[in-house]
Amino acid sequence: MNSRLLVALIACACSATSASAHAFLKRAQPSAGAVLASPPKSIALAFTEKLEPALSCVNVTDSAGHNLAAAAPVIDGVSMIVPLRPLGRATYRVTWHAVTGDTHRTEGAYTFTVK
């Protein structure tokens, strides 16, 4: 294969990938699988792209499916933070979906435990 053609194909592939902005979870506090000695007062998620606040969300539930958010999530730039009601000893599930300005959606879930 001609080296110029190969370079052109690689450039096209890279530009198509970067044009598709998806917000992937970069960091979570508490993190996935964390075992905590004391309960967190909030969940903080950071993403790789700026979020569309009206279309993005995070929920925290107990084993019975009860929502434990004390208020609506605060979504600013690449972060989502949700304050929590007081938590007891249990395993909790964090579910989220993140939408960027060009409406690409990602979603995920993880658990953490308070001992």
Image (spheres, rainbow, N blue to C red):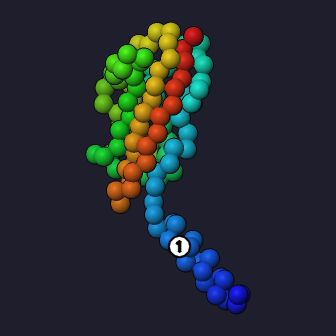
On screen, residue 97 above or below 68: below
At horizontal 34% and vertical 18% (from top left) the residue drawn is 66
**Disc 1 marks which residue?**
15
Which quadrant of the rendered structure holds the C terminus? Answer: top right
At horizontal 70% and vertical 87% (from top left) the residue drawn is 1
> Residue 2, image x and y in percent?
70, 90
On screen, residue 7 above or below 38: below
On screen, residue 30 above or below 64: below
Among all residues in the image, which is located at the extreme front? 1
Type of the residue with mark 1: Ser
At horizontal 62% and vertical 76% (from top left) the residue drawn is 10
Disc 1 residue crowd, few under 14, some 14–19, many 20+, Cα 10 Å: few
> Residue 72, image x and y in percent?
30, 31
At horizontal 61% and vertical 84% (from top left) the residue drawn is 8
- Residue 68 visible within the image: no
On screen, residue 99 above or below 67: below
Decide if residue 15 is on the left or right side of residue 103: right
> Residue 28, image x and y in percent?
53, 35
